[in-house]
Amino acid sequence: MHEQDTEGVKIGLEVHCQLTSLATKLFCSSPSDYRGKPPNTNICPVCIGTPGSLPVLNRKAVTHAAMIALALNFKIPERMLFFRKNYFYPDMAKNFQITQYDRAGGVPFATDGHITLDSGKRIRIGRMQLEEDPAKLSYDGTIESSTQTFVDYNRAGITLVEIVTDPDFESPREAREFLNKLSSILEHLSVSDLNLEGSVRCDANISMAGGRRVEVKNISSFKEVERALNFEITRQRSLTSKGIKVMQETRHWDEIRRITISLRLKEEEQDYRYFPEADLVPVTLTKQFVQDVKKGMPEMPEERAKRFQKDYHLSGETAQILVREKALADFFEEAAKHSKDARQLGSWLAVDLQAYLNEYGKSLEELKLTPKHFAEMANMVSSGEVSRGAAKTAFVEMLKTGRMPRSISEEKGLKVISDTGFVESLIDKIFSENPQAVQDALKDPKAVNFLLGQIMRATKGRVDPAVANRLVRERLAAAKGSK
Ligand code: MN
């Protein structure tokens, strides 16, 4: 991606993630699995707020949110309560959303968390709250030109965690790294499947030196965030360069056209008339509860990276790349069971594979390769059977066809040649074709490299370099002796 000048840029993120691991919604027993169902069939009196219906807090939602809070280094207040956020909009039939609030006596689910970037820079996450998802609206045509809006309440009441960072990012790249780390943490916790459509939504606020704060809403995947931010930097910079002031406003990210569109100019904070949700009692999260959640936590990406360095002797950089996605880290560990050289394996997965996936815009799952493919690849190279350079040919062929690397290597004749008889006859040929070079090599040891280069060229780098080196020097020594 095009590198931007990010001088004076300040970015903050607000992320909403659905807890897709839960069987039921946050305050009722309607199923969490709403996707693919006919509109307005996955609902009950509680999630559409008919008179007399009462919410009951989902205990598992609290446990899973606590796991996220601990993984993101948050403090969890002992008392948890919910607030009503009042507004008039068709996506909440009750005309309010049950959420949490950090003012008017309210406390969020957790406060003062952070994620540390690879550079050591700490991104502060001011608060995290638990809240219900609103309904899904759709339009006939585009959001700007539609004359009809459709409301589907199937999603209303699904559990969301909202996490809000401080404006600590100084570039879109830092924001992407943060989101990569966050998604790997959520994957390792198995609380949110980010691949499900609509499971994650992101808003980003961005300001540049001298400009006002612009909020970009409705970014529907982590991958799009960096793109939307890069667009905004370009847009704001071009305004400033023409002497036009950047105004405080809310913009919408149009994924198809890859531009932001102005939604509304914002004069001040909207007043949602927050007040405590009287239908839900305050919940006490005891120290014992938090301790128990902590004990039940699975291994997190940072710990896993450290273990990879220790157990498999990987570099810190390789380990970090492998734990960026849980699926890749799992794949590596499975392959390592079949490999004699985990370092070699790690470099094929973290470097060569990633380069290929980036170039072709593919994912590891799409390639339909097994851990054994990569283990065999690494074993072939570490045993000296194929040179790393020649193995690259087999590697690309393996990714394209799904064939096992050894059979590709055999078919393409990629094996290292260490058969001395063959190398001797090759030396005969090269020496007779290059008499001047042989004369030079007899006088100057450095000139030997030209002859070795010819041997490598004739065999596309397949001759074992140690064997070629030894035999060429022996031959030269013999020639000198017979003079
Ligand atoms: Mn929210």
Image (cartoon, helix red, strand yellow):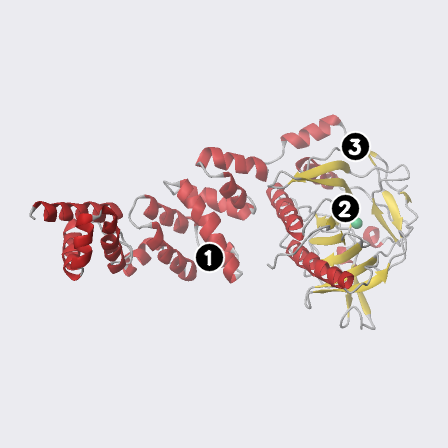
Q: Is mark 3 within 8 Å of ligand 1?
A: no
Give me the disc on residue 368. Answer: 1
Percent position of residue 115, x then y:
67, 40
466 relative to 435 in the view: left or right: right
Alpha carbon distance from label 3 to label 1: 46 Å
Q: Name the kind of residue labelled 1 in the image.
A: Lys
Q: Residues within 10 Å of mark 1 (few under 14, many from 20)?
A: few
Mark 1 or mark 2, whichever is nearer to me: 1
Alpha carbon distance from label 2 to label 3: 20 Å
Residue underneath mark 3: 77
Q: Secondary structure at mark 3?
A: loop
304 relative to 452 in the view: left or right: right
Q: Residues within 10 Å of mark 2 (few under 14, many from 20)?
A: many
Mark 2 or mark 3, whichever is nearer to me: 3
First in residue order: circle 1 vs circle 2: 2
Is residue 318 visible to us here?
yes
User: Residue at 20% across / 45% down in the picture?
Assistant: 470
User: Residue at 28% across / 60% down in the picture?
Assistant: 411
Q: Name the kind of residue labelled 3 in the image.
A: Pro
When the figure is inspected, residue 474 is found, relative to residue 35, above or below; the finding is above
Residue underneath mark 2: 26
User: Residue at 72% across / 44% down in the picture?
Assistant: 168
